[in-house]
Amino acid sequence: MSNNDKEKDRAIPGYMRFVIGGLAGVSATTLIQPLDVLKNRMQLSGEGGKKRDHSNTFQAFRNIVAKEGTRGLYQGISANILRQATYTTTRIGVYQSLVDLFARAGYEGFSAQVSAGLLGGLIGSLVGAPPDVALVRMMSDGRLPVSERRNYRHVGDALTRMVSEEGVFVLLRGVAPAMLRAMIGSVSQLVTYTQTKHYLIDHGMMKDDPRCHFVSSLLAGLVYTTVSNPIDMAKTRIQTMKSVDGRPVYTGLFDVWTKTISKEGVLSLWKGFSPYYMRMAPHTTLLLLFTERFTYIYSVHILHNKSSHAF
């Protein structure tokens, strides 16, 4: 394509970056919700040195289906959809918008992508904090004794009851590890994807097509899972914790890690890695493929551009 053709391409409006990110996130999450439930349950299994509820992913799957039916694999789906509509919409929208903005200002490359990823994750985690707390609680409810279950009917009921029963600040419970996970996650996921995709294309190894997007997203999912699993585990335990004698079980991220390592061993920081990777690999792949495809549809078929690039 000539430079003149490139100049004729119309820029995708900033708000559409957010809309596309949200649609991609909701589409991907709807398909992989059962894996999210498995990941959540395994991260809580054996908490505090107690006997593990599940020793592996397959046992967790069997136990959930046996005790709660197949509906148990979709606990918290309404909260997950709302989370994607807030967190992922913001995270991807901010990342893409900032990369575009930085490029126009002459600030490009790896450092610009890292900066955009950090800011995107930070802002997205704040916007998506309330539905994230509701999501974790709703997915973990089935593992509790019947008398201790919260029994939220849907995400709206969860948010309303959390505020009325525990105060408004409960909506931000676990926000510190969530922010850290989101910032590190956005960099490891989005920047890994962008860098891998450009490397494969620039070195003539692949063309800018779905096959390239698929390979890049698989690597991004592996890096994201490995780096963020300990943070996600801590976030899950903080968001589901209850008070003992009027005091919270954990005081923060490092307190979770310290107590977990002392009682369960250092490898427990990666507890739930298999379902987490099984969740994040397809979710990352679907999220980025949907983002690329929706961007292509909007850019080529609505703006009538000759090309399309999501990242």
Image (cartoon, rainbow, N blue to C red):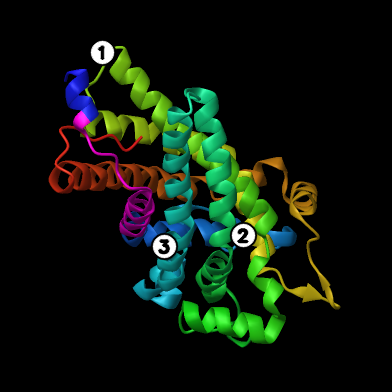
> Along the polypeptide, which appears first: circle 1 or circle 2?
1
Q: Amino acid at mark 1?
A: Gly
What x and y, as percent, mark residue 122? Answer: 60, 49
For label 1, the SS is: loop
- Quarter that holds the C terminus: top left
Can residue 24 be seen here?
Answer: yes
For label 2, the SS is: helix
Q: Which residue is mark 1?
A: 204
Label 1 Cα crowd, 10 Å radius (few <14 / some 14-19 / many 20+)? few
What x and y, as percent, mark residue 89? Answer: 42, 55
**Disc number lying in front (1 or 2):** 1
Residue 262 in magenta stretch: no
Residue situated in front as seen by the camera: 239 or 310: 310
Q: Label for residue 85?
A: 3
What x and y, as percent, mark residue 176? Answer: 69, 54
Relative vertical location of residue 149 with respect to residue 266 in this rendering, above or below = below
Label 3, label 1: how far apart the Cα atoms are: 36 Å
Q: Which residue is mark 2?
A: 236
Q: Which residues are magenta?
A: 8-27
Q: Quadrant of residue 84?
A: bottom left
Relative vertical location of residue 204 with respect to residue 305 in this rendering, above or below = above
